[in-house]
Amino acid sequence: MRLPADYLAEKYQENIFRAALSVSKRPGDAEDAVQDAFVQYLRSDRDFESEEHIKAWLIRTAINRAKNTVVSFWNRNRIAWEEYMADIPFEEDKDQILVEAVMELPAKYRIVIHLFYYEDYSVSEIGEILNVSQSAIKNRLLRARKMLKEKLKEDWIDE
């Protein structure tokens, strides 16, 4: 199955961007990762099983590209994600606190939280996207929730 890239971009670009942003923490890098994912899709002659399979492949490709960017030399001389976060309007302060707490998690926990809660992927689907076992995904979710609970408890006690 192949679908037109413009259809996929219109439907999934924001989801893919948010997944890449959760890894890179920089909007520009996330945008580049999304663009690279779509370029790879266009260049690929791969046949996909379903639209969901294409979406998962695009997310995985963008995440891998974002990871490569994070470890690159040029990454050290860029604007921090905190500056980007300052421009996002949140309905409640607690929403911003939660997003900031998630972004402070180590990358392997941050991405599973993003895919599970924001993209509504199941544990098995996340395992396929990240090429990690289901038990590892469950452990990462458990540890990430524990870290978030501790972090958010501290923030809410201080208020």
Image: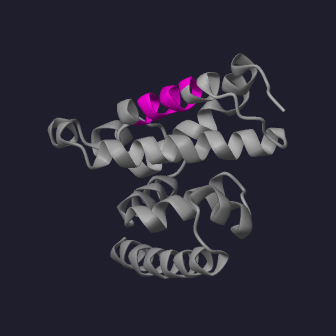
**Quarter occupied by residue 131:** bottom right
Q: Position of residue 147 (x, y in %)?
A: 43, 78
Residue 59 in the figure: left or right of residue 32: right
Q: Position of residue 150 (x, y in %)?
A: 42, 81
Residue 80 in the figure: left or right of residue 23: left
Q: How is the image coloured?
A: one colour
User: Which quadrant of the rendered structure holds the C terminus?
Assistant: bottom left
Give the prevailing secondary structure in the magenta stretch.
helix
Whether 73 is drawn above or below 12: the answer is below
Would residue 127 be seen by someone viewing this image from the given angle? yes
Q: Position of residue 142 (x, y in %)?
A: 56, 81
Whether 135 is drawn above or below 11: the answer is below
Residue at image point 49% right, 82% down: 146
Residue at image point 69% right, 28% down: 45
Residues in magenta, as a range: 30-39
Tally of marks: 0
* Residue 35 magenta: yes
Residue 127 vs residue 15, the one in the foreground: 127
* Residue 73 magenta: no
Residue at image point 51% right, 40% down: 62
Residue 104 vs residue 93, the one in the foreground: 104
Residue 28 in the figure: left or right of residue 115: left
Residue at image point 47% right, 68% down: 109
User: Which quadrant of the rendered structure holds the N terminus?
Assistant: top right
Would residue 25 be seen by someone viewing this image from the given angle? no
